[in-house]
Image (cartoon, grey):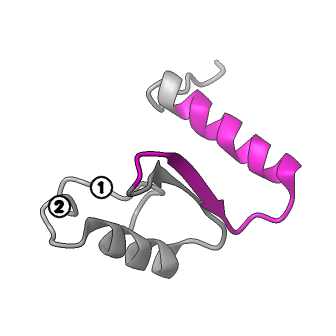
């Protein structure tokens, strides 16, 4: 992968998309957070990050990226 995004358009068409995403993540990432809906309809999260502060920082960085659509303006 050339960036830190797993492009889901090709994965959605697989028979086991969760298994495919997890396999790709295991090959690419050192630490991760997985957020999703379980089979009972509850939002759940699992992570490899042992420190809550690191997890919160990671989630805030992701939130910022989502809200800004990943666009950062350079300082001139």
| Residue 5 is at least partly visible in this image | yes
Which image quarter holds the N terminus?
Answer: bottom left
Rendered location of residue 75, percent (x, y): 66, 21
Whether residue 58 appears in magenta in the rendering, the answer is yes
What residue range appears in magenta?
Answer: 40-65
The residue positioned 49% from the left and 31% from the top of the image is: 66
Viewer-proximal residue, 70 or 27? 27
Mark 2–mark 1 CB contact (< 8 Å):
yes
Name the residue furthest top.
Answer: 76
Rendered location of residue 73, percent (x, y): 56, 22
The residue that label 1 is drawn on is 7
The residue positioned 50% from the left and 22% from the top of the image is: 68
The residue that label 2 is drawn on is 10
The secondary structure type at the circle numbered 2 is: loop
Q: In this view, does 34 lie to the left or right of 9?
A: right
Viewer-proximal residue, 9 or 35? 35
């Amino acid at each position: 992968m050339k960036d830190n995004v797993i492009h889901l358009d090709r994965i959605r068409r697989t028979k086991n998309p969760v298994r495919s995403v997890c396999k790709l993540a295991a090959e690419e990432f050192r630490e991760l957070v997985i957020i999703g809906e379980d089979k009972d309809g509850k939002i759940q999260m699992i992570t490899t990050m042992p420190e809550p502060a690191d997890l919160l920082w990671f989630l805030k960085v992701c939130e910022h990226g989502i809200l800004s659509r990943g666009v950062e303006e350079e300082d001139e």
